Every structure is written in C-alpha cells, then in structure tokens.
Image (cartoon, helix red, strand yellow):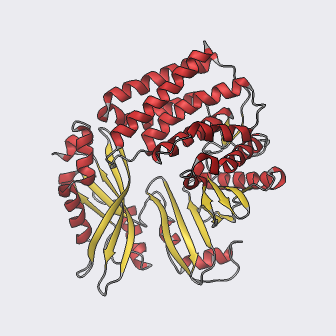
Amino acid sequence: MNIFEVVAGKAGLAGVRWALLADPPREVLRRELTSLLPPGSVVERFEITRAKFKPGRYLMAYYDVCILQPGGDSMIRPIEVVWRPEGDDEPCGVPDEVLAMQEEAQRRGLSAPFRGLMAAVPAWGMRLQIAPLDIHFPQLVRLYDPTYVPEMLAASSAQRTVVRYNIASVRYRPGQRHVLRYLHSNGGGAVFAKVYNSDKGARAFKVAGSVAGWLELYGDGMRCARPLAYLHDDMVVLYPGISGTPLSQLLQQPAQETAQCLRRAGECLLTLHRMPAVQMELKQHSFELEIRSIASASEHIHALLPQVAATIARILDRGQELHERLPQEPAAFVYGDYKADHLWMTPEGLTLIDCDTCYLFDPALDLGKFLADLRWWYDGYANNGVEHAQEQFMAGYGPLISPDRLARARLYEALVLVKTTVRRVPLFESNWAPRTLRLISCANALLNSLAARAL
C-alpha cells in the first residue's frame, strides 16, 4: 500500500483504514514520537480519537499518546498527524513561529518529556505536532502553563485567590479549536477554557450570557451554563464545570424512561425560539450555506462509497427543490447545534451548554437538528423507539407548532442526518461503511416521505 495513493483517494476505504490502523504506518508514527523522547521514555500506546479525510488534499488523525517515563509514571498527550500529497512538503523548513512556540513551551517546562513538539517524514508525506503547539493559537502555550493559569484565573471573576490547578486538554484541534480543563488541585470545581483566535470568543461570551439570562427569566427551571469571564488578552472564555449526565448518555435507556427529559428538551428549545435576537450581534445563516456545508463535509464519500455519494447528491438536489416549495418565515434566533450532548440533566435541572453556533435563521433547523440527532444516537445504541422519543420531544416543543415549520423541520431532519453521518461516523471503526449506508438510506427515505406529503 502506498500512502500517497491513499491521500489521493485512489486506495479507497481499505487504504484509509490501512493508514489509520495498520502496523507499517503506526510503526512510522511510533518511531517519530520515540525520536522526540529522551532515553528511558517509551511510547506505551496511542489511541486514535478522530479522523478526517479530504481526498487529494489530506488525511488527518488525532491520537491520545500514552508515554511511560522512567520510574513508572505515565502521561497522556494529544497529537495531530496529517498526511499530505506527494511533493506538498514545506519547502522552507520549519516556520519561525513553530520554533518560537517550541522554545516557549520548553522555557515553561511544557514540552517534557518531548524534546520537540513537531516532526515530519517526507517519505510518508506525514507531519505531526504535539500539544500545546499550534501557531494559529499563539496564546495556547501559556494557557497550559500551571504557573500562568492560577494568576489568569485569579485576575478574572472565576477565582479570587491564586491556587494550583491540574491542567488537561479536552480538545486539541490545531488551527481549529481548543478546550482545556482546569481542575482545582484541592478537589474544588473545574473551570473550562475555550480558546479562540478571533473575535468569535467575545461574541460567544455575549450570546451565552444573553441565553443564560433569558432561561433564568423564562426557562421554568431550565438553565444555560453562564460563562464566568472573557479574557481579552488570552482570547479565552471561561465556563464553570457542570455536574450531571448528558442527555445523549441517557438515551441508552428505554424511550419511556427518558420521556420527561425529552419533553423538557422540547420546552427548552421553544423558550429559546421566543428569545429576541436584537443587540446580540448574531450572524445570518442561509439554506444555501447549509447545503454547501453538507456537500463539503461529504467530499470523502465520493472516493470511499461512490454509490452513497450519488444518493447524497440526489438528497441535496431534492432538498433544495422542496425548500423552494415550502412556505418560509422570518429569520429568528437559532441555537444552531441543538443536540443531546449539549443538554445535561443536572441536580438544578436541564442545563444547556455551548452557545458558539447561534445565528439568525429558520427555527425549523434546530428542530430538524435534534430530530436527526435522536436518530443518530438511537442507531448507535441499537435502541428501538426513536419515533416515540421524537414524539416526546415535539410534545414538549408544543402541539401548536405551525404545519409549515414542522414540514421544514422534517426537511432539515433529513439533511442534517446526512451531515451528522458523514461527519461523525468514525472512519477508523469497522462498521463505518454499513452504518454510513444505513443512515444515508434513512435520510433518503425521510425525504421521500416528506416529498410524497408535499405533493
């Protein structure tokens, strides 16, 4: 197998799985990681957590690497590995920004046990980088620093006194996003830090505060995690830790046992849709943008499952036709990513997290998103009763929903199920192909049913 044929999309699904899981490429990765370690430290294991494939452009994977150090201690570090087309290697060597960040990490004692945080294997078109390296987020290194973080939190409204924190990476996505967890070393509550490289963090802080305030007034016991602070110099939003269980985990139970939670989820969404969107600096979304995002997310399907890709293309075409025929309504506040793992059941009640994707658009998108998300979780758990679960959610949203909004919600259910499938079914799992085929077929059937009723 040739890695460059894999990246080009010529080796199909078998090639992608070989690159992610087979012994030869994993040994190359192990060798490069080992070369960055001092004698006595060993790469004990590395576990793949996510993969993304853009045929002809890159294959990308994220791993949690466990390092066994002299004396028996072990530590886990997240890394990113990218394979690119042949001849796509950096002609000018390592950028100065990378060297500067590595030097800062070493100065702060954050590289250890690694002696460097980046490596390249041109013969394999491979590059890897290790947390906290990311030149797109130059503040990231200090946000991992156990001497800087207590001072940062003490200077904010999050913590009045300087204390020690255990720092862990929740999400390491170079060039995209980062989330860190700061856990009080004395057993206190956690603080989560979402890191940005634009003014999006300031907007997210403002929107989350507005949503939290609205639910406090009108949510009947439902809440939104209110951000603790936005730190302009670090471009980071701080959030309190939440104690509870995500609704996505509860969906493993029989549908009748989660009925009340699902009704509350519907009530919460209806309350959000009644929130005035003025003075929130929300961006405008559109149906065209939604379609383009689904098409972009589906690029790898063309190389790996061509027949499924053809089905997706038909779904998008017919979805556009149906959308043009359905009555529309004025844009309003839309949460944008309303799904079961953003809803937590806590001792204080249902709690909503993560307001980063709010915008102005059709509220039917939120409904369709959650309906599709229920299908995703019930399929993954091999749990029957998704229709009953959807009925409970819609009952909570309200029986007076207009037929037009409901029809558009069902359209978005089919479309978002496509997006959810192509984005979230892990490429490295053995059931990727059959599960992708099953869920796309379900989306196609949903659209057929809606089209038949719309005639």
Q: Nearer the viewer, residue 326 or 245?
A: 245
Q: Is residue 244 left or right of residue 41?
A: right
Please report the residue visible at 49 percent of the width from the left and 31 percent of the height from the top: 292
Q: Is residue 264 above or below residue 346?
A: above
Picture quadrant of residue 128 = bottom left
Q: Is residue 265 above or below residue 331?
A: below
Specify the farthest residue to the top. 455
Q: Is residue 56 left or right of residue 438?
A: left
- Residue 187 position in % (x across, y down): 60, 81
Q: Is residue 123 left or right of residue 225?
A: left
Residue 203 in sight here: yes
Total label count? 0
Quadrant (top left, top right, bottom left, bottom right) of the C terminus: top right
Picture quadrant of residue 440 = top left
Q: Is residue 319 left or right of residue 258?
A: left
- Residue 229 position in % (x across, y down): 69, 65
Please report the residue visible at 71 percent of the width from the left and 45 percent of the height from the top: 263
Please report the residue visible at 43 percent of the width from the left and 29 percent of the height from the top: 441
- Residue 378 position in % (x across, y down): 51, 44
Q: Nearer the viewer, residue 138 or 47?
A: 47
Quadrant (top left, top right, bottom left, bottom right) of the N terminus: top left
Picture quadrant of residue 94 = bottom left
Specify the farthest residue to the bottom. 71
Q: Nearer the viewer, residue 347 or 385?
A: 385
Residue 234 in sight here: no
Please report the residue visible at 65 percent of the width from the left and 25 percent of the height from the top: 407
- Residue 264 position in % (x across, y down): 72, 48
Specify the farthest residue to the right. 217
